[in-house]
């Protein structure tokens, strides 16, 4: 497919105006009409075939959903108000091997995900690439109660909203070619993550989370960011991680928990909560049908994470997901 044919499809699909913007696809700039008196949140995430997802086992529609969902998850972790405009810019680098049908399915996935969560696409960029299919999404949202990673205090608890290790188990099952029947919850978690927008917003609004982030690179590493940026150490109880029972029964306990701690792609929310607010936080989780688990405690320190498995010190063989850049 040629560039302008794609832009034509995108224009028809996503329109040229929407909530929070008076001009979208089709001009040199999109014209955003920002909400007044609220903090504007902006995030960008780039994903590449073979690194962040794989068309070997995710459908192109799933890939479209996924690239939107991971950006909305960053907005959720920052306390975005999902009832205010959420505006996306979608840049794609497309290699010669990608068929028009695959591109169309990808756009179907983007479209279906933005409709699910009430977001819009207001622009982007398109290029050919001599390499794997790569997508960069920039997402803009608004919040009256923005949250960051630096508010945890010594004595706070680390709580997880959502499940851990499902996507990692799903990837392991797909990558090793095991039968997926009965394990679709896991494989879907990898190909099609769910951004926890509603609960992220409620937590931010309630002001009972002091620091929050979404778990994209494995809780061992991600919770370390929360600790370091808050000027704390963290004790992390690996055996308490909310690893899905199906992941444990399929992969065995040792592997399921190792994947849970280190693989990433969970898109659960991890937050620092003071012990007296625990019940209120649990009630918000219950109202949103979201698992709620306390998995650690913050202490005075400088960002060290000490993992324990049933009281024994625990470390990851590799340290969570970190890209190797260049040589
Ligand atoms: P320019 O040459 O001025 O950069 P482009 O030809 O790259 O403009 O893009 C034309 C219009 O199409 C712009 O409004 C841009 O935002 C939009 N656009 C291009 N690629 C995409 C894409 N992948 N997704 C959404 N909008 C896109
Ligand atoms: Mg361009």
Image: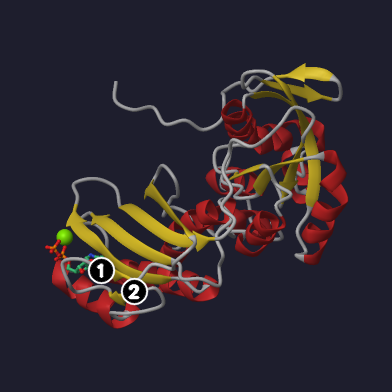
Compared to residue 218, the image places residue 56 above or below, namely: below
Residue in the image at 83% along x and 47% along y: 277
Drawn side of residue 36 relative to residue 267, left or right: left
Q: What is the x, y in percent for residue 320? A: 56, 30
Compared to residue 52, the image places residue 309 above or below, namely: above
Residue 118 shows in this picture: yes
Residue with the mark numbered 1:
30
Q: What is the x, y in percent for residue 107? A: 36, 70
Q: What is the x, y in percent for residue 271? A: 69, 43
Query: CB under 8 Å between callouts 1 and 2?
Result: yes
Residue in the image at 15% along x and 71% along y: 4
Disc with the residue nearer the chain's start (1 vs 2) = 2
Task: Look at the numbered disc 2 and give the secondary structure of its residue.
Answer: strand
Is label 1 within 8 A of ligand 1 (CB to nearest ligand atom)? yes
107 or 223: which is nearer to us? 223
Give the class, few, some or many, for how many residues have Cα within 10 Å of label 2's Cα (few <14, many ≥20). some
Task: Look at the numbered disc 1 and give the secondary structure of its residue.
Answer: loop
Q: What is the x, y in percent for residue 229? A: 57, 30
Whole-Å distance between the Cαs marked 1 and 2? Answer: 7 Å
Residue 165 shows in this picture: no
Q: Quadrant of the N terminus?
A: bottom left
149 or 255: which is nearer to us? 149
Image quarter for ligand 1 equals bottom left
Q: Which mark is residue 21?
A: 2
Is label 2 within 8 A of ligand 1 (CB to nearest ligand atom)? no
Q: Which mark is residue 39?
A: none
């Amino acid at each position: 497919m040629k560039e302008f044919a794609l832009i034509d499809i995108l224009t028809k699909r996503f329109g040229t105006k929407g909530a929070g913007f008076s001009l979208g696809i089709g001009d040199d700039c999109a014209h955003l009409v920002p909400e007044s008196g609220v903090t504007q949140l902006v995030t960008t995430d780039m994903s590449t075939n073979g690194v962040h997802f794989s068309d070997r086992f995710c459908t192109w529609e799933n890939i479209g959903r996924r690239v939107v969902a991971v950006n909305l998850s960053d907005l959720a972790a920052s306390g975005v108000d999902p009832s205010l405009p959420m505006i996306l810019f979608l840049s794609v680098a497309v290699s010669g091997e990608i068929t028009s049908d695959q591109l169309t399915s990808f756009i179907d996935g983007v479209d279906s995900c933005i409709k699910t969560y009430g977001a819009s696409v207001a622009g982007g960029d398109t290029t050919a690439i001599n390499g794997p299919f790569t997508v960069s999404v920039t997402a803009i949202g608004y919040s009256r109660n923005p949250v960051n990673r630096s508010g945890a205090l010594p004595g706070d608890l680390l709580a997880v909203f959502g499940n851990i290790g499902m996507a990692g188990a799903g990837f392991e099952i797909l990558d090793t070619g095991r039968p997926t029947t009965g394990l679709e919850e896991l494989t879907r978690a990898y190909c099609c993550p769910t951004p926890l927008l509603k609960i992220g917003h409620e937590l931010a609004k309630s002001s009972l989370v002091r620091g929050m982030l979404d778990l994209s690179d494995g809780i061992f590493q991600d919770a370390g960011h929360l600790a370091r940026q808050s000027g704390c150490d963290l004790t992390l109880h690996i055996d308490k991680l909310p690893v899905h029972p199906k992941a444990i029964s399929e992969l065995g306990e040792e592997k399921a928990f190792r994947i849970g701690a280190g693989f990433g792609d969970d898109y659960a929310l991890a937050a620092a909560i003071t012990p007296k607010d625990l019940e209120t936080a649990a009630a918000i989780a219950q109202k949103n049908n979201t698992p709620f688990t306390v998995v650690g405690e913050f202490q005075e320190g400088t960002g060290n994470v000490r993992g324990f498995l049933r009281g024994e010190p625990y470390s990851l063989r590799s340290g969570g997901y970190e890209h190797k850049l260049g040589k």
